[in-house]
Image: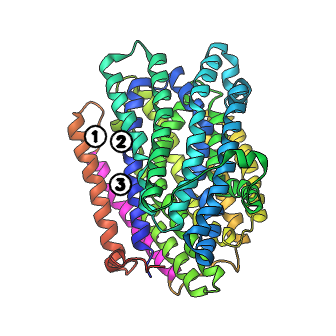
C-alpha cells in the first residue's frame, strides 16, 4: 500500500482551494488595501478562520477518524452512522449555543482579539458589526468538518478536500463586481464580502451533506434527543476529548492569532500580516492538510492492529512527502518574497510601502514552514494513542515563547514582531514534540538519508534561483509591464522546480511509480 496517491489527491484538492483562495486575496488587496476596513475584515475572521483551520486540517480527524474506523470494522457502516448521528446531534446544539453567545459578547471578543482597536471606538464598532455577521460561519464550518471526517474515515478524501473551492469561487465573483465599482466605498465592500463568506459556509455544508448521502449515509440528527440526554454516552465523552485534540491539532494556528494581536497594535500591520500569511499558507495548506487528513487513519489502524510496519511506512512516506514540498517552498519563498508580493499584491489600494513590509513579514514567516509541517507528522503518534496531555503542554509552553519573543522584537522592529514570535513559538512546539515522541515514531531504513538529500536538493535549487534572480532584477522592477514580470517570475519558479525535481530524482529520494500505486482497499 502506498500513501503517495491519497497524499497527492488531498494535497492537490487543497492546493486548488489555496490557489483560488490566493486569487481571492489578491482581489481583496486591490479592493481594500491595508487600510482600516482591511484590518477590520481580518479581525472579524480571526476566530472563524482559527476554528476552520483547526477542524479542517486534522482536529476532527484526530478525534473522530480512529473511533469511526473502529466502529466500521466492528459493526459495519450502520454502527458507524448510528454513532455519528448521535455525535452530530450534540454538535448541532453546541454550535447554535456557541454562535448565540458569540453574537451577544462580540464587543468583548473583539476587544480581546484585536486590543489595538480599542484606541479607535469607530474602528472597534465596525469590527463588532463585521464579527457578528461573520461568526455564524463557525457553525457551518464545525458541522461540515464533522461530515468531512466521516467521509475521510471511508477513505473518501477528495470529496471533502474539494468543497472549500465553493467559498473561493463565490468570493471571486463578488470581488469582480466590487472592483468594477458596484459598491460605494471600502466599508460597503467589506460588508458585502463578509456576507458572501457566510452564504458560502452554508453552501459548503449542503455540499458535504449531499456527498455523504450519495455514499448511502443518510444523516439523521436529533437535537431534541441531545437536549434531553437520549444520546450515546460515548458521543459525549468523545466530544469532551475532542476539545483538547482541537487544541493540539490547531496549536500552530493559535500562534497566528497571537501574532494578529501583536499586529493590531499598529495601523495596517494586521492586514499586512494577513496577506503575508496567505502566501505562507499556499504550500502549508497543500502539505499540512494532506498529512493531517491522510496519515492519521493509517497510523491509527496500524496501532490498533499492532502493525508496526504499517505505521513505519505511513510515517516515512509522510515525512518524505512533506520534505519534498516544504524545503523548496521555504527556500523559494524566502528568496522570491519581494518580487512575489510586489507583482501579486501591489495594485489598486495596495501601495509600494505595503508591499515592502509584507515581503519582510513573509521572509520571516517562511522560516516556520518546516516546523508547522513536522508537527503534523509527529502528532499522529500521540493522537492515534489518544494521548493529549504532553502535546497540550508543549503547545502551551510554545505560546509563552511566542509572546515573549514578540514582545522583545517589538522594541527593535515592530513590523517583524508578530512573525518573529510565530517562528520562535512554532519551532519551540516542534522541538518539544519531537523530544516527547521518542519511542513513538517509527520510520523505515534510509528515511532520514532521503530527507537530507531533499534538503540538499532544495539548497542547490535556492542557489540557482538566487543567481537567476540577480540577472532578472531589472526586468522584475515595479515599473516594467505586469505581463512581463509575471512571465519572468513564473520562469524562475519553473526553473527551480525542474532543478529540484531532477536533482532529488537522481538522488533517489522519490519514485514516480509510487504516485501511480493506489491505496489498497480496506
What's the CA distance linking mark 3 and mark 1? 13 Å
Q: Position of residue 132 (x, y in %)?
A: 61, 26
> Which mark sits nearer the N-terminus, 3 or 1?
3
Binning the other alpha carbons within 10 Å of mark 1 as few (below 14), some (14 to 19) or many (20 upward) gives many
Quadrant in which residue 121 is drawn: top right
Decide which of 455, 384 is in the foreground and name it: 384
In this picture, residue 485 sits left or right of residue 105? left
Decide which of 492, 90 is in the foreground and name it: 90
Q: Position of residue 147 (x, y in %)?
A: 54, 55
By secondary structure, the bulk of the magenta-drawn segment is best described as: helix
Q: Cβ–Cβ below 8 Å for labels 1 and 2?
A: yes
Q: Is residue 457 visible?
A: yes
In this picture, residue 58 sits left or right of residue 98? left
Q: Which mark is residue 476?
A: 1
Q: Cβ–Cβ below 8 Å for labels 3 and 1?
A: no
Q: Is residue 459 visible?
A: no
Q: Which residues are magenta?
A: 447-472
- Vertical placement of 259 versus 196: above or below? below
Quadrant in which residue 510 is drawn: bottom left
In this picture, residue 263 sits left or right of residue 179? right
Q: Residue under label 2, please give it.
A: 339
What's the CA distance linking mark 1 and mark 2? 7 Å
Q: Residue under label 3, please give it.
A: 466
Amino acid at each position: 500500500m502506498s500513501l503517495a496517491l491519497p497524499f497527492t489527491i488531498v494535497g492537490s484538492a487543497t492546493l486548488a482551494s489555496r490557489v483560488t483562495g490566493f486569487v481571492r486575496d489578491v482581489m481583496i488587496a486591490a479592493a481594500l488595501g491595508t487600510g482600516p476596513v482591511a484590518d477590520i475584515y481580518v479581525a472579524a475572521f480571526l476566530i472563524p478562520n482559527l476554528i476552520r483551520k483547526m477542524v479542517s486540517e486534522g482536529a476532527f480527524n484526530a478525534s473522530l477518524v480512529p473511533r469511526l474506523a473502529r466502529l466500521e470494522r466492528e459493526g459495519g457502516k450502520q454502527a458507524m452512522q448510528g454513532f455519528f448521528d448521535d455525535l452530530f446531534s450534540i454538535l448541532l446544539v453546541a454550535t447554535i449555543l456557541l454562535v448565540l453567545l458569540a453574537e451577544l459578547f462580540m464587543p468583548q471578543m473583539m476587544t480581546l482579539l484585536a486590543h489595538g482597536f480599542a484606541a479607535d471606538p469607530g474602528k472597534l464598532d465596525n469590527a463588532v458589526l463585521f464579527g457578528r455577521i461573520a461568526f455564524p460561519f463557525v457553525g457551518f464550518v464545525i458541522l461540515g468538518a464533522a461530515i468531512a471526517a466521516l467521509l475521510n474515515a471511508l477513505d473518501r478524501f477528495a470529496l471533502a478536500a474539494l468543497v472549500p473551492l465553493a467559498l473561493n469561487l463565490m468570493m471571486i465573483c463578488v470581488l469582480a463586481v466590487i472592483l468594477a465599482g458596484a459598491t460605494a466605498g471600502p466599508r460597503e465592500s467589506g460588508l458585502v464580502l463578509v456576507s458572501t463568506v457566510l452564504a458560502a459556509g452554508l453552501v459548503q455544508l449542503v455540499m458535504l451533506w449531499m456527498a455523504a448521502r450519495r455514499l448511502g449515509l443518510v444523516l439523521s440528527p436529533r437535537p431534541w434527543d441531545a437536549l434531553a440526554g437520549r444520546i450515546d454516552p460515548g458521543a459525549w465523552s468523545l466530544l469532551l476529548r475532542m476539545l483538547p485534540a482541537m487544541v493540539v491539532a490547531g496549536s500552530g494556528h493559535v500562534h497566528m492569532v497571537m501574532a494578529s494581536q501583536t499586529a493590531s497594535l499598529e495601523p495596517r500591520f494586521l492586514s499586512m500580516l494577513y496577506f503575508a500569511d496567505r502566501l505562507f499558507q499556499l504550500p502549508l495548506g497543500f502539505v499540512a492538510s494532506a498529512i493531517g487528513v491522510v496519515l492519521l487513519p493509517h497510523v491509527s489502524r496500524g496501532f490498533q492492529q499492532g502493525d508496526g510496519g504499517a505505521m513505519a511506512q505511513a510515517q516515512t512516506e509522510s515525512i518524505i512527502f512533506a520534505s519534498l514540498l516544504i524545503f523548496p517552498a521555504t527556500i523559494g519563498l524566502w528568496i522570491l518574497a519581494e518580487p512575489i508580493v510586489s507583482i501579486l499584491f501591489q495594485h489598486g489600494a495596495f501601495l509600494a510601502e505595503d508591499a515592502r513590509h509584507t515581503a519582510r513579514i513573509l521572509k520571516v514567516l517562511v522560516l516556520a514552514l518546516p516546523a508547522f509541517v513536522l508537527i503534523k507528522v509527529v502528532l499522529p503518534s500521540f493522537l492515534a494513542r489518544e494521548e493529549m496531555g504532553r502535546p497540550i503542554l508543549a503547545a502551551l509552553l510554545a505560546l509563552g515563547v511566542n509572546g515573549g519573543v514578540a514582545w522583545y522584537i517589538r522594541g527593535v522592529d515592530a513590523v517583524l514582531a508578530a512573525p518573529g514570535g510565530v517562528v520562535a513559538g512554532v519551532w519551540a512546539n516542534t522541538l518539544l514534540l519531537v523530544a516527547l515522541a521518542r519511542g513513538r515514531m517509527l520510520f523505515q531504513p534510509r528515511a532520514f538519508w532521503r530527507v537530507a538529500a531533499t534538503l540538499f536538493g532544495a539548497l542547490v535549487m535556492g542557489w540557482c534561483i538566487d543567481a537567476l534572480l540577480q540577472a532578472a532584477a531589472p526586468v522584475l522592477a515595479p515599473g516594467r509591464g505586469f505581463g512581463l514580470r509575471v512571465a519572468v517570475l513564473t520562469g524562475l519558479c519553473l526553473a527551480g522546480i525542474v532543478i529540484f525535481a531532477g536533482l532529488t530524482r537522481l538522488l533517489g529520494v522519490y519514485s514516480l511509480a509510487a504516485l501511480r500505486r493506489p491505496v489498497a482497499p480496506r
